[in-house]
Amino acid sequence: MDQVTLTYQNLIEQCEKGDTRAQLSFYEQHYKPVFTTCLRIVGNKVEAEDVMQETFITAFSKLSSLESEEKATGWLCTIARNKALNYIQRERKSWVDLKDHDEPVHDTKYEEVDVAYIHKGIKLLPEGYRLIMNLYLFEGMNHEQIGSSLGISASTSRSQYARAKQKLKQIIEQHYD
């Protein structure tokens, strides 16, 4: 591969052939959202980098299933989410079933909290709470999907989410009031 600008399709073809420069180019175009997805789920930079690496290894072996350039980032983030969830199941603690907390929590004191505080607070949550909150809020998964992915019941996911919201309120009160 020389200095000639490749079309995206040519880039994919070169990646499939194992051209490391093409693979590096593909990686450089897409690593930021993939890393963000991994980090949000595993919560640790080093572990997120490992999961991201696994994501790209898998992606390079399945590039033929990529439908278009426009779908590449979403396709990669889906692979990353699945890899991160598998990592969590393989490496992390087991879940404890808790009673369901279906009551909506409404507190006007928190209606105008700066989004930056929320993101910082989520990072301070215990691992299980942080994981479920990120999957629900940022990955768009419902409690049935979260439960299935983590090997827990949907009601456990709901109760963990409710407890995570309560804990997040406490964190915001302690650190940002």
Image (cartoon, rainbow, N blue to C red):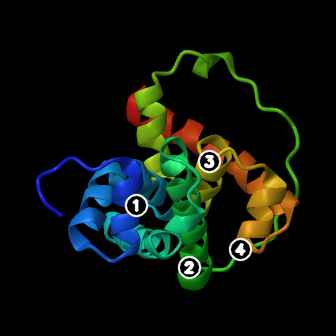
Mark 4 lies on a secondary structure that is loop
Question: Mark 1 or mark 3, which is nearer to you?
Answer: 1
Q: Amino acid at mark 3?
A: Glu
Of callouts 3 and 2, the N-terminal one: 2
Circle number at residue 139: 3
Mark 2 lies on a secondary structure that is loop
5 horizontally vs 98: left or right: left
Of callouts 1 and 4, the N-terminal one: 1
Is residue 111 something one can see in this rendering?
yes
Of callouts 2 and 1, the N-terminal one: 1
Going 75% across and 25% down the picture, which residue do you hit? 106
- Find the distance from the CA under tag 1 to the CA under tag 4: 40 Å
Question: Counting other residues with Cα less than 10 Å from the Cα at mark 2, is it few (<14), some (14-19), or many (20 or more)?
Answer: few
- Find the distance from the CA under tag 3 to the CA under tag 2: 20 Å
**Quadrant of the rendered image containing residue 89:** bottom right
Question: Counting other residues with Cα less than 10 Å from the Cα at mark 4, is it few (<14), some (14-19), or many (20 or more)?
Answer: some
